[in-house]
Image (cartoon, helix red, strand yellow):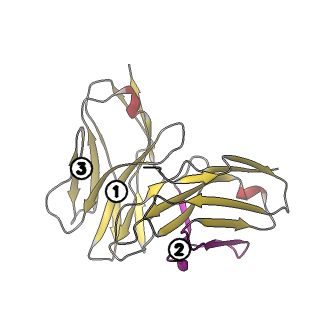
Amino acid sequence: DAGVTQSPTHLIKTRGQHVTLRCSPISGHKSVSWYQQVLGQGPQFIFQYYEKEERGRGNFPDRFSARQFPNYSSELNVNALLLGDSALYLCASSSGRGNEQYFGPGTRLTVT
Amino acid sequence: AQTVTQSQPEMSVQEAETVTLSCTYDTSESNYYLFWYKQPPSRQMILVIRQEAYKQQNATENRFSVNFQKAAKSFSLKISDSQLGDTAMYFCPGRPTGANSKLTFGKGITLSVRP
C-alpha cells in the first residue's frame, strides 16, 4: 500500500510570494494533519482536517490556510511568505479514530 | 495543554549495545497516547512504538520497548542490540485519546550509533 505522499519535494520561493503544498493520505484514512518543522526542532502543529472539516488549528497566523478535498487529499496554503516560514512541512494521515498518525516525506520550503 | 520534555539533546551508543532515551509528558488529560517516532537524516518521520496511558503493560516492538511510569510522567524508549540504521533523531509526542487530536512534540534527541 502507498504511504502518505507530498508534493513538491523541495520548493524555493521569494519573500511575499504565495505557496501551495499538497498531501495525499494513506488509502482509507480520512484525517490529515499539517506540521511545520524548523531545522533542529520538533514539528509544530498547524492544522487538522477530518472529513473535509477543520478540527484543529495551531498557533499560526492567518497567512496559513488549508483545506481537504472529497478524496481526503489536502492542500496547505501560505500567503505573503516570510524568511521564517522556511521549514520542512510535514503531512500526516490517520483513520481519525484515535489511531496513529503516519507521516509523509515532507516538503522542504526555502524562502529567500 | 500538553508539554513534552526531552532533556538529553544528544546520545551515543556502540553498535550492538543497549541505549535508553528519556522523555517526560505532562498533561491534565486522564487518558492519552504516547508515541516514539524516529527521524533519520532523510527526515522521513517513522513511527517506532505506541503506548496507551490506561494500559499498565509496557509496549514492545522487536528491539524497541518502552518504560511508562504514569505517576512520574516518564516515558523512556529502550533500544536493544543497536544497529547503525538506528542513527536518527527521536521524538516522543503524545496526544489525548479524543479523535482527531493533535500530536505535541518535544525538541527531540539525536542518537548516534557508532560502528
Picture quadrant where residue B81 is located:
top left
**Which of the chains bears the disc numbered 1?**
B
Question: Whole-Å distance between the Cαs marked 1 and 3?
Answer: 10 Å
- Amino acid type, label 3: Val
For marks 1 and 3 on the same chain, the one whose residue lies earlier in the sequence: 1
Image spot of residue B77 (x, y percent):
29, 46
State the extent of the magenta-drawn residues as a range.
Answer: A43-72
Q: Give the amino acid type for the residue marked by disc 1 in the picture.
A: Phe
In percent of the image, x 54 and y 80: which residue is there? A53
Disc 1 with disc 3 on a shared chain: yes
Q: Is residue B106 visible?
A: no
Compared to residue B12, the image places residue B61 above or below, namely below
Is A70 inside the magenta-drawn segment? yes
Q: Residue B32, position in %: x, y?
A: 30, 70
Mark 3 and mark 2 in contact (Cβ < 8 Å)? no
Cα distance in 3D space between marks 1 and 2: 21 Å
Q: Residues within 10 Å of mark 3 (few under 14, many from 20)?
A: many
Q: Secondary structure at mark 1?
A: strand
The label number, if any, that marks residue A91 in the structure image: none
Under mark 2, the amino acid is Tyr
Q: Residue furthest top?
A: B115
What residue did someone put label 1 on? B35
Q: Which residue is mark 2?
A: A49
Mark 2 Cα shell of 10 Å, populated few (<14), some (14-19), many (≥20) = many
Report the residue at 34% width, 70% height from top.
A98
Crowd rating for badge 1 (residues with CA inside 10 Å; few <14, some 14–19, many 20+) = many
Give the answer, above or below, for where B82 lies relative to A7.
Answer: above
Which-is-in-front pick, marks 2 and 3? 2
Tell me which residue sits at (33%, 24%) in the image.
B14
The residue labelled by disc 3 is B66
